[in-house]
């Protein structure tokens, strides 16, 4: 066949379809009429793996993508030298060439063990080397000088076609990932619309009031709370009432990603950026573009990752690993952590500038031990949830004797621990009534002391009242006048209220946590709040 006709017919075959399997099956039939071949393969050299990556194999009856890695060992110089060749390489006997022999051995399941000839040509574009196209002969020494001439006619059209196919595949894979993500997000949104946050009118009332203030707003939000308190559920609620509710909502657990992969996960990577980067990958920031990114356990980010995250938040651009072009992103950030970030700031393990970027609107979740009134509701919810999952037909009831012990337990794992405990109890005793407390620790150190008891609180405050009265007696005896002694006629509740107000004022309104009024009075914060409500003492956000 004349060169012009060969070139024209080859172009018609290789460009007939963007699907590699269809295009190469048609091309193989044409080339098999011009070359003595049993198969065609494409492989690329991965310098970091020091290996060949076999990308596809096409034969008369099939097109395969075996995705085989062939180690080169001591034969690296040979393959590196071949990448510089602009002429065809005719390996008359594969057995005499180590790289060709390794390649053929990797394909023995498809081609058998017989020795063959290889005719190899580099595929390259202006962007770089695409790989080695290998015509696998029927026998040894079966390719002629005419074959070497014709294969070089293929270099330009096949290189261009392969580049277009690769880009088409990357686009198709990206579309497929986005479609899957869209379906996942649609399912999550449907689920979220049916989710009711238990405790929103009781133990989580103040928290939900804070969440409702974010309705229609896009402020960066930092959710703080112990492990298992439901930070992700609150993040979902914040996203659900935001202007981006119908936009992408992407979640990532920063503590679950190895440090070496954080950049790739957050910002994506280009093909060939590192060992194993066989395709371009878009990161979580690009996936969330136009929507919301939930950074769970943000306190676990290592210092270097904190710097890169801060730069993205400041510039609103990312760069993929191995990429050179900045990519603009528009992302609303919701972050969560159970780590004490303020302490980490003092220790230098969390960047101050990143903290202030994230901490625009903080939401503090109370631990379960401070919302013990929600425990029966949560238990009922989890019983219903797991009864459906375990296909239990009977209505399972909680043993009423359990309630007091469940509310006295300190719940270090919070709601997650309670959920797991209910599942365990239902699995072991599916008929009820459910005695969850039998699975609680026996050690009394796991339980909240009598500081939860209001009688204890009352007696504690009474001691303080007596101190105040004694001081007043001393002042009255030294200063007179008699009308001051009318203060003795105040009720115990009013004096108690006065003392609590004094302590709360000294603590700058802080109820919970280090330096809070509950700590000063040595009582449980929830108990203090209940007493303040009974005494009509106003207080703001439950910190």
Image (spheres, rainbow, N blue to C red):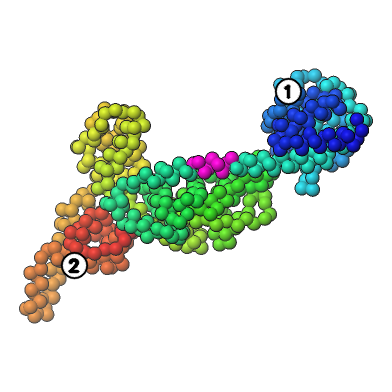
Q: Quadrant of residue 416?
A: top left
Q: Do the CB atoms of the residues marked 1 and 2 lie less than 8 Å apart?
A: no
Q: Dot 2 corresponds to which residue?
A: 498
Quadrant into which the N terminus falls: top right
Helix, strand or loop for the magenta stretch, by majority = helix
Disc 1 crowd, CA 10 A, few/some/many (<14, 14-19, 20+): few
Residue 122: x and y, percent? Answer: 82, 38
For the point 66% across and 47% down, which residue is it?
Answer: 270
Residue 61, disc: 1
Residue 27: x and y, percent? Answer: 78, 31
Tell me, yes or no, whether the highlighted magenta stretch contains residue 179: yes
The tally of labels here is: 2
Which marked residue is nearer to the observer: mark 1 or mark 2? 1
The answer to whether residue 79 of the structure is visible from this angle is no
Q: In this view, does 234 lie to the left or right of 34?
A: left
In this rendered view, identify the residue nearer to me: 27 or 277: 27
**In terms of secondary structure, where does tag 1 sit?**
loop
Tell me, yes or no, whether the highlighted magenta stretch contains residue 147: no
Q: Quadrant of residue 177?
A: top right
């Amino acid at each position: 066949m004349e060169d012009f006709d060969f070139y024209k017919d080859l172009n018609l075959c290789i460009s007939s379809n963007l699907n590699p399997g269809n295009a190469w099956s048609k091309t193989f039939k044409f080339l098999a009429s011009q070359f003595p071949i049993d198969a065609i393969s494409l492989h690329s050299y991965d310098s970091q793996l020091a290996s060949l990556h076999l990308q596809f194999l096409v034969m008369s009856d099939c097109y395969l993508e075996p995705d085989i890695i062939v180690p080169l060992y001591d034969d690296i110089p040979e393959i590196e030298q071949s990448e510089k060749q602009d002429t065809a390489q005719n390996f008359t006997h594969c057995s005499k060439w180590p790289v060709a022999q390794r390649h053929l051995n990797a394909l023995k399941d498809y081609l058998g063990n017989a020795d063959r000839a290889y005719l190899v040509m580099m595929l390259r574009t202006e962007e770089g080397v695409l790989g080695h196209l290998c015509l696998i002969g029927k026998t040894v020494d079966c390719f002629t000088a005419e074959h070497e001439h014709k294969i070089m006619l293929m270099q330009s059209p096949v290189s261009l076609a392969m580049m277009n196919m690769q880009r088409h595949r990357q686009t198709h894979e990206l579309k497929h990932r986005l479609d899957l993500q869209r379906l996942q997000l649609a399912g999550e949104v449907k689920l979220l619309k049916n989710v009711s946050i238990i405790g929103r009118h009781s133990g989580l009332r103040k928290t939900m009031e804070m969440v409702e203030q974010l309705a229609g707003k896009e402020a960066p939000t930092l959710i703080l709370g112990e492990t298992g308190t439901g930070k992700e559920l609150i993040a979902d609620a914040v996203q659900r009432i935001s202007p981006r509710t119908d936009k992408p909502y992407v979640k990532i657990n920063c503590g679950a990603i190895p440090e070496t992969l954080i950049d790739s996960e957050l910002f994506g990577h280009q093909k060939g950026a590192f060992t194993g980067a066989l395709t371009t990958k878009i990161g979580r920031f690009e996936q969330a573009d136009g929507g919301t990114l939930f950074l769970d356990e943000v306190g676990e980010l290592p210092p270097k990752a904190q710097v890169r995250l801060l730069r993205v938040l400041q510039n609103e651009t990312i760069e993929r690993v191995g990429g050179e072009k900045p990519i603009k992103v528009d992302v609303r950030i919701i972050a969560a952590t159970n780590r004490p970030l303020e302490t980490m700031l003092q220790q230098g393990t969390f960047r101050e500038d990143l903290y202030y970027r994230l901490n625009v609107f903080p939401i503090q979740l109370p631990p379960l031990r401070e919302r013990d009134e929600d425990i029966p509701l949560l238990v009922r919810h989890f019983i219903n949830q797991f009864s459906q999952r375990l296909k239990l037909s009977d209505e399972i009831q909680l043993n009423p004797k359990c309630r007091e012990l469940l509310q006295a337990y300190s719940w270090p794992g919070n709601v997650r621990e309670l959920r797991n405990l209910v599942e365990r109890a239902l699995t072991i005793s599916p008929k009820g009534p459910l005695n969850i407390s039998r699975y609680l620790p026996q050690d009394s150190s796991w339980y909240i002391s009598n500081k939860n008891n209001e009688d204890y609180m009352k007696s504690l405050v009474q001691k303080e009242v007596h101190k105040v009265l004694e001081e007043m007696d001393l002042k009255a005896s030294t200063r007179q006048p008699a009308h001051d002694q009318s203060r003795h006629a105040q009720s115990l509740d009013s004096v108690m209220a006065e003392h609590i107000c004094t302590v709360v004022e000294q603590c700058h309104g802080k109820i919970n946590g280090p330096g809070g009024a509950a700590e000063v009075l040595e009582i449980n914060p929830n108990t203090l709040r209940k007493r303040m409500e009974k005494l009509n003492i106003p207080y703001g956000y439950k910190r």
